């Protein structure tokens, strides 16, 4: 596809990145403020982005399906079947539940259910529109500077944010997914051709001030994976030593910053403590989610994505993407997403000799690992960090297969 910098697909992509940066920067305390009014009906900005992407995808699907590589078609078929299931079964049920409620009570939750459409949208329309597809990655990386600058600026002004447990958290915890993406795609240890300190250092700072213990644990797992399964094996030892030395220096710095030391060190030291109040809270949520799943195991009980009506909160998500999917999507939706993760991960791992594939595999690994302990898997503020590597893996696979076909012509072509 010819590069079209200001085409509709690119504009939607730019809007999506901007929307995510605004959410992560915390400029809006209430997400309902980021809504559009259509005839008195408030529709979220994210729903507008998704609807725009859906229009382009539906009308262009037939044309791009023919040009898609056969290796990617099984996943595209699965996505199409899942979307049809949501529109023909779940949408009517949701409308029935919300018959006495405002239209937005099922429109916005439905957007969350249909956002997987953004994967083929990126694969078919956005990524091919870039003459150099790495520019799409760079745009996403540079957007991470916005919430970081806002957070540090607020901190300098004396505006300090804390978690519910009183621990320092300068930037939203879900932003860890974006900063991990930036770190993996800009640090040489994770297979990049060279380190981009302008992006890698702010990404490391972002992970720290997000102060999320899940992010610390999964960063360690991803780093270990990068060391065990190197891209080419060369310079891996030197890279590992450098990374360990850098982590040690960073740890010493943290121990000497009082406000960070008190919060950061306590977060790390209690990360694997099963008796920690946060851990006990997670176990309680998982048990409740399982009970809700058993009440309707096929389609899920919470069609509106609302969980437990209790006195203190109206929404009490289980903070684990499997227990999040089971009660809201049932066996059908859970099986679909697990298939999607396994299919894309297997493809990326089989091409791990390719720099881009390896990076996207590590990004996907971080996303899934992080969401095992958090309620971010289908979050509209970070779903881009899931959809982007999935679509990039598909796009890159198609490119590599076409290159191999060109370099290894058939008998008829050689004659």
Image (cartoon, grey):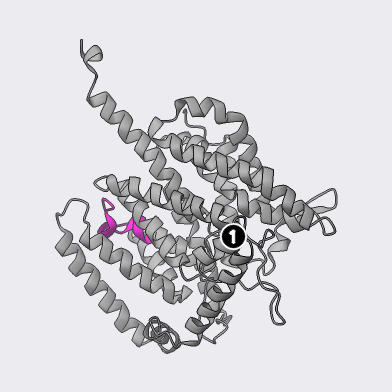
Near-viewer residue (392 or 198) = 392
Instruction: Name which quarter of the figure residue 87 lies in.
Output: top right
Can you see residue 308?
yes
Residue drawn at x 72%, y 82% is 311
Residue drawn at x 65%, y 51% is 111
Q: For this view, does 15 lie left or right of residue 136?
A: right
- Residue 227 location, x and y as percent? 22, 62
Q: In the rendered picture of this protein, how many numbered marks are placed on residues?
A: 1
Segment colored magenta: 183-195
- Residue 133 location, x and y as percent? 41, 40
- Residue 360 location, x and y as percent? 37, 51
Q: In the rendered view, would you say 266 is above or below 216? A: below
- Residue 38 location, x and y as percent? 80, 48
Would you call the spot at circle 1 few (<14 residues within 10 Å), some (14-19), or many (20 or more)?
some
Q: For this view, does 301 lie left or right of residue 39?
A: left
Q: For this view, does 87 lie left or right of residue 384?
A: right
Can you see residue 156?
no
Which of the image's four quarters has the C terminus? top left
Instruction: Name which quarter of the figure residue 216 lies in.
Output: bottom left
Q: In the rendered view, would you say 248 is above or below 277? A: above
Residue 184 belongs to magenta span: yes
Q: Which residue position holds label 1?
A: 297
Residue drawn at x 77%, y 57% is 97
Residue 179 belongs to magenta span: no
Q: For this view, does 269 lie left or right of residue 373?
A: left
Kindly state the secondary structure of the residue where label 1 is placed.
loop
């Amino acid at each position: 596809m010819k590069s079209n910098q200001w085409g509709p697909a690119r504009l939607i992509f730019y809007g999506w990145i901007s929307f995510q940066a605004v959410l992560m920067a915390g400029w809006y305390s209430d997400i309902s403020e980021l809504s559009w009014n259509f005839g008195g009906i408030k529709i979220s900005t994210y729903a507008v982005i998704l609807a725009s992407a859906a229009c382009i995808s539906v009308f262009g699907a037939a044309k791009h399906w023919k040009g898609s590589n056969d290796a990617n078609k099984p996943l595209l078929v699965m996505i199409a079947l899942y979307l049809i299931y949501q529109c023909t079964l779940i949408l009517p049920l949701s409308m029935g539940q919300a018959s006495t409620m405002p239209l937005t009570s099922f429109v916005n939750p439905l957007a969350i259910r249909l956002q997987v459409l953004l994967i083929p949208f990126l694969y078919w329309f956005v990524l091919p529109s870039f003459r150099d597809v790495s520019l799409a990655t760079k745009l996403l990386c540079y957007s991470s500077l916005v919430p970081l600058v806002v957070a540090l600026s607020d901190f300098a002004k004396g505006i300090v944010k804390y978690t519910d447990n009183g621990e320092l958290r300068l930037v939203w915890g879900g932003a860890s997914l974006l900063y991990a993406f930036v770190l993996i795609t800009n640090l040489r240890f994770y297979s990049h051709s060279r380190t981009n300190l302008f992006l890698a250092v702010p990404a490391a700072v972002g992970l720290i001030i997000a102060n999320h213990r899940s992010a610390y644990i999964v960063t360690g797992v991803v780093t270990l994976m990068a060391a065990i399964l190197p891209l080419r094996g060369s310079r891996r030892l030197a890279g590992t030593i450098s990374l360990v030395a850098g982590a040690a220096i960073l740890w010493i710095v943290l121990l000497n910053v009082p406000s960070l030391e008190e919060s950061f060190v306590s977060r790390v030291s209690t990360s694997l403590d099963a008796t920690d109040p946060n851990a006990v809270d997670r176990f309680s949520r998982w048990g409740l989610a399982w009970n809700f799943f058993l009440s309707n195991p096929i389609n899920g009980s919470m069609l509106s994505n609302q969980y437990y009506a209790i006195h203190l909160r109206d929404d009490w998500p289980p903070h684990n993407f499997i227990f999040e999917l089971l009660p809201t999507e049932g066996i059908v939706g859970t099986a679909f997403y697990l298939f999607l993760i396994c299919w894309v991960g297997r493809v990326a791992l089989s091409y791990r000799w390719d720099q881009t594939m390896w990076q996207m595999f590590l990004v996907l690994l971080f996303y899934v690992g992080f969401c095992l302990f958090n309620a971010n898997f289908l979050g509209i503020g970070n779903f881009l960090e899931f959809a982007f590597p999935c679509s990039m893996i598909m796009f890159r696979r198609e490119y590599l297969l076409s290159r191999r076909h060109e370099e290894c012509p058939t008998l008829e072509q050689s004659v």
